[in-house]
């Protein structure tokens, strides 16, 4: 038996053992053709490849690497005009695009075909394709080379909760980012933000990841005049209110960075009611008309917030008193809906709208508190009616005690 045949046989045995392991019990089948020599040596690549989605699509080693898979000697197998071996970053882009930019091939899987065009417009694409900068990521840096999984697979590098970890491989490398004048720390900042808490703590997959704002293949930070529109893809009503006010015009003109003027970018936070006025003075003079509008907005939002909390406390008191609360809970839900409208409308800077919404919340809260006060009065009145009952009961006990004492004396 030639050496190549012996290597192939050994590879088949090893691959069979690996395929029989419990961890691989659910892996896709990759039939080993006795004439297919790649897996004889590259058994570890076979294991990784079987985990990925390409293995069930009929793709094999030579489709990407070239060579002669029917040959049993390395020199012959690693030959041929199409042999690539380990493709470089530029060659990887071409290889992936040869299928993923072909509508005829992607149509059956419902996949888009514009990733290469998007990549060319990205900062990553500019660095690699035009500048030949090999520090820039290519397809396999984000999707892996062999274990390529769809985005809805929780093991995928581009699953929503894994995207940050994929990006931080480069963007948390201080030495690497220093060469481009970029800071690190954005990933941890995002994890601690309102968006990060929603995604990683509350498992809300509607919350944005890195690619939601920067794009995936067309990865670029949004321009100053685009930020409000990017945020508005999720915060639709806020965007509408924002563009109806003075800040919207300033954002379109590029004078202010849209939403991030107040909320920051990676560390996006909710501005607390008692911080609204202070946030306004970061741009406006403290006594200016614009700053005074901020003070009024803060007062309206603070009042509505306090009214909402007081109605919640009143409902808790009603529950402790054993009262039915279905109706007041429904009213409270209405107040909560209006309160959410306040958080949207405040971006319009329209004080009349805010005052009207705040008044609605206050009116509902007043009704709920009144219901709790009436219930408290009933409890007090009920307690007063019990005083004669307790007095009569105590009197009966005392009389019975004297009677019992008198009987005992007679017996003596």
Image (cartoon, rainbow, N blue to C red):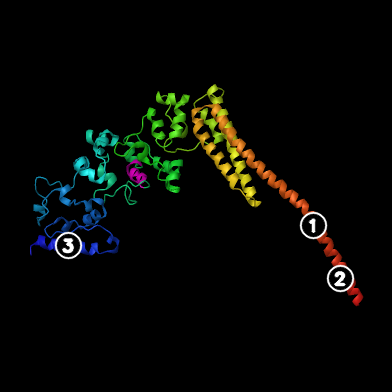
Cα–Cα gap, marks 2 and 1: 22 Å
Q: In the image, which is nearer the foreground, mark 3 or mark 1?
A: 1
For numbered disc 1, what is the local secondary structure?
Answer: helix
Whether tag 2 and tag 1 are in contact, CB under 8 A, the answer is no
Q: Which residue is mark 1?
A: 389
Nearest the viewer among 141 and 103 is: 103
Residue 172's x, y, as percent?
36, 42
Cα gap from disc 3 to disc 1, whole angstroms: 93 Å
Q: Report if residue 245 lies within the magenta region.
A: no
- Please provide the residue range marked out in magenta: 162-171
Position of residue 174 measured from the top left corner of the image (x, y, whole percent) = 35, 40
Residue 292 lies left or right of residue 253; in this view the side is right
Residue 215 location (% of width, % of height): 33, 37
Residue 139, placed above or below residue 401:
above
Secondary element type, mark 3: helix
Between 35 and 206, the residue placed more toward the observer is: 206
Instruction: Give the quadrant of the N terminus.
Output: bottom left
* Residue 102 in view in this figure: no
User: Badge 2 is on which residue?
Assistant: 404
Compared with 246, 50 (above or below) is below
Find numbered disc 2 in the image and state the secondary structure of the residue it sits on: helix
Mark number displayed over residue 12 = 3
Report the number of discs: 3
Which residue, as the protein is rendered here, is positioned at the far front?
327
Please identify, in this view, whether the residue under mark 2 or under mark 1 is nearer the observer.
1
Relative placement, left or right, of 392 versus 100 is: right
Q: Residue at x 83, y 64 (%)?
A: 397
Q: Is residue 352 visible?
A: yes
Check residue 168 for magenta coloring: yes
């Amino acid at each position: 038996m030639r050496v190549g045949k012996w290597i192939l046989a050994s590879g088949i045995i090893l691959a069979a053992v690996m395929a029989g392991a419990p961890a691989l019990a659910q892996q896709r089948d990759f039939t080993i053709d006795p004439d297919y020599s790649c897996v004889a040596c590259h058994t570890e690549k076979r294991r990784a490849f079987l985990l990925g989605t390409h293995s069930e699509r009929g793709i094999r080693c030579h489709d990407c690497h070239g060579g002669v898979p029917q040959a049993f000697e390395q020199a012959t197998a690693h030959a041929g005009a199409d042999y690539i071996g380990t493709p470089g970053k530029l060659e990887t882009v071409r290889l992936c695009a040869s299928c993923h930019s072909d509508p005829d091939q992607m149509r059956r899987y419902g996949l888009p075909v514009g990733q290469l065009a998007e990549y060319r417009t990205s900062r990553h694409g500019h660095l690699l394709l035009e500048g030949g900068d090999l520090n820039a990521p290519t397809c396999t840096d984000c999707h892996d080379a062999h274990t390529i999984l769809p985005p809805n697979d929780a093991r995928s590098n581009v699953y929503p909760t894994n995207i940050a970890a994929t990006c931080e491989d480069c963007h948390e490398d201080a030495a690497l980012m220093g060469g481009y004048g970029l800071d690190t720390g954005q990933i941890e900042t995002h994890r601690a933000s309102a968006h990060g808490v929603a995604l990683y703590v509350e498992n809300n997959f509607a919350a944005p990841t890195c690619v939601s704002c920067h794009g995936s293949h067309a990865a670029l930070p949004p321009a100053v005049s685009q930020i409000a529109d990017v945020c508005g893809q999720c915060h639709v009503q806020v965007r509408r209110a924002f563009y109806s006010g003075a800040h919207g015009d300033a954002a379109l003109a590029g004078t202010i960075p849209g939403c991030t003027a107040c909320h920051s970018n990676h560390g996006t936070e909710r501005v607390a009611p008692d911080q609204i006025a202070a946030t306004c003075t970061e741009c406006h003079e403290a006594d200016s008309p614009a700053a005074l509008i901020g003070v009024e907005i803060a007062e309206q939002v603070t009042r509505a917030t306090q009214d909402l909390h007081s109605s919640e406390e009143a409902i808790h008191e009603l529950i402790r008193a054993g009262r039915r609360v279905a109706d007041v809970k429904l009213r409270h839900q209405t107040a909560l809906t209006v309160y959410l409208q306040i958080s949207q409308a405040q971006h319009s800077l329209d004080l009349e709208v805010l005052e009207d919404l705040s008044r609605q919340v206050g009116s509902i809260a007043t009704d709920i508190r009144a219901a709790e006060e009436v219930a408290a009065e009933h409890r007090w009145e009920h307690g007063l009616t019990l005083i004669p009952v307790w007095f009569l009961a105590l009197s009966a006990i005392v009389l019975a005690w004297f009677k019992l004492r008198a009987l005992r004396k007679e017996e003596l």
